[in-house]
Image: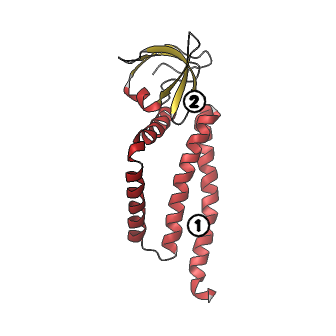
């Protein structure tokens, strides 16, 4: 019985054995990049989790293909699932845009934690120090001691002036 699935079992084992070093390599690359640009661990861990999820999905598709599931069927199933999720989460599009903006802020690093920035918002302009940059929002501290949670997608849409760079930052102002 097992003999007829021998090649699939071997291919699955090889795929699983490739998955583990790929996950470690991805972790190493993201950690190296974050160390090079001086990023905080909370943001790095969020990016690592998101990329690990993507890597896991890719390897699941490989294993399904090994066991004879046609790629067209996998793609049809995935698009159906994403369509249902997309319709169900239509009201939650801002969450997805904030996560995407958080990843873009991580890789483009226009400012860092500890920088003082001024947001050029017509309705709510303010100047504050960046306390933390999370997956969904950035936390600011104003000179009056107020903590402001500001959505990451708005940080990409509004004009920002970097008033004072973090003292430990050696980066040029971008």
Residue 15 numbered tag: 1
| Separation (CA) of disc 2 from disc 1 | 33 Å
Q: Quadrant of residue 55?
A: bottom right
In the image, 94 versus 103, the foreground residue is 94
Q: Secondary structure at mark 2?
A: helix
What residue did someone put label 2 on? 37
Q: Residue at x 47, y 30 (%)?
A: 151
Position of 93 with respect to 143 (left or right) is left
Q: Secondary structure at mark 1?
A: helix
The x and y percentages for residue 24 are 64, 51
Q: Residue at x 61, y 50 (%)?
A: 25
Foreground residue among 109 and 137: 137
Rendered image quadrant of residue 84: bottom left
Q: Are marks 2 and 1 in contact (CB under 8 Å)?
A: no
Return the residue found at the far left.
Answer: 122
> In the displayed image of the protein, which residue is found farthest to the bottom?
1
Query: Is 88 above or below relative to 59?
Result: above
- Number of residues whose C-alpha sits closer than 10 Å to that of mark 1, classed few (under 14), some (14–19) or many (20 or more): some
Q: Position of residue 158 (x, y in %)?
A: 38, 23
Residue depicted at 57% across the width and 80% down the height: 7
């Amino acid at each position: 019985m097992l003999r007829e699935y021998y090649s699939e079992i071997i291919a699955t084992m090889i795929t699983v054995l490739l998955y583990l070093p790929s996950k470690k390599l991805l972790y190493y690359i993201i950690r190296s990049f974050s160390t090079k640009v001086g990023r905080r661990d909370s943001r790095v861990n969020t990016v690592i989790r998101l990329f690990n999820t993507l890597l896991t999905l890719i390897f699941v598709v490989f294993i399904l293909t090994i066991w004879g599931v046609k790629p067209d069927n996998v793609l049809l199933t995935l698009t159906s699932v994403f369509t249902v999720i997309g319709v169900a989460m239509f009201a939650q599009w801002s969450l997805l845009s904030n996560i995407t903006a958080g990843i873009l802020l991580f890789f483009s690093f226009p400012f860092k934690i500890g920088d003082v920035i001024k947001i050029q918002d017509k309705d709510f302009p303010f100047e504050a120090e960046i306390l933390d940059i999370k997956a969904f929002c950035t936390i600011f501290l104003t000179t009056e001691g107020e903590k402001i949670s500001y959505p990451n997608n708005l940080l990409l849409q509004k004009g920002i002036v970097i008033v004072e760079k973090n003292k430990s930052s050696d980066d040029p102002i971008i």
